[in-house]
């Protein structure tokens, strides 16, 4: 089994990532050997990539709030791993960030996840992560999130982007029913 450092270097040296490596941009994810919680999302935001720290943006602030953890617990607990579907910011499209590159997670997730054998809860953040890990999900992301208990140990969530304010306003059950369960599970595993 390759080490975390060997995987990191292999990702950087992969020809598909040459443009990023040439620009001095490193893959952004976090392997924590003692992780009990894994966060899977689409890709780092532009600001997170510039800060060279995963979830270091407004979405990360909201995600930590949803999880009921402090910044110190999130980054320093030794219990949270982060593996997006693509480890590089994909760029901007017409209506938001571009999707993660196809095939990237297929190539890199399995060797990375083997380095975190204690994961008991995987948060799937947004539609791309939900589609990738839950092929038998509900018809919509909203219904999948509403029925989160059916997918344990996966926990599907909408993206915590500030752009999702409208969705949160239309779906008050999310804050009333889903977030307390999420926080309880996170607290039990930290």
Image: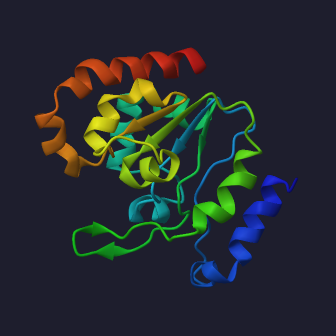
Q: Residue at x 36, y 70 (%)?
A: 98
In the picture as drawn, the residue positioned furthest to the right comes out as 1
Where residue 43 sits: x, y (%)? 47, 60
Please tell me whether residue 19 is drawn above or below residue 123 in the rendered image.
below
Q: Is residue 68 visible?
A: no
Where residue 32 sits: x, y (%)? 70, 40
Q: Residue at x 61, y 77 (%)?
A: 24
Q: Residue at x 48, y 44 (%)?
A: 134
Q: Is residue 141 visible?
A: yes
Where residue 72 sits: x, y (%)? 53, 31
Please tell me whether residue 83 is drawn above or below residue 69 in the rendered image.
below
Rendered image quadrant of residue 34:
top right
Where residue 121 sits: x, y (%)? 56, 30
Q: Residue at x 49, y 53 (%)?
A: 132
Q: Is residue 148 left or right of residue 87?
A: left
Q: Is residue 19 left or right of residue 8?
A: left
Please tell me whether residue 69 is drawn above or below residue 32 in the rendered image.
above
């Amino acid at each position: 089994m390759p080490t975390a450092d060997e995987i990191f270097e292999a990702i950087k040296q992969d020809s598909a990532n040459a443009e990023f490596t040439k620009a001095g941009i490193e893959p952004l994810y976090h392997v924590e050997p003692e992780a009990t919680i894994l966060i899977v999302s689409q890709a780092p935001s532009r600001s997170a990539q510039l800060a060279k720290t995963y979830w270091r943006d407004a979405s990360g602030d909201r995600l930590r709030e949803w999880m009921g953890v402090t910044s110190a617990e999130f980054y320093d607990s030794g219990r949270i791993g982060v593996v997006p579907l693509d480890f590089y910011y994909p760029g901007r499209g017409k209506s938001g960030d571009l999707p993660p590159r196809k095939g990237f997670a297929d190539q890199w997730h399995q060797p990375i996840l083997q380095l975190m054998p204690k994961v008991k809860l995987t948060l799937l953040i947004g539609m791309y992560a939900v589609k990738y890990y839950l092929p038998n999900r509900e018809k919509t992301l909203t219904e999948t999130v509403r029925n989160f208990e059916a997918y344990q140990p996966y926990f599907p969530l909408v993206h915590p982007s500030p752009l999702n304010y409208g969705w949160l306003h239309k779906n008050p059950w999310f804050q009333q029913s889903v977030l307390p369960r999420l926080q309880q599970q996170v607290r039990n595993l930290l």
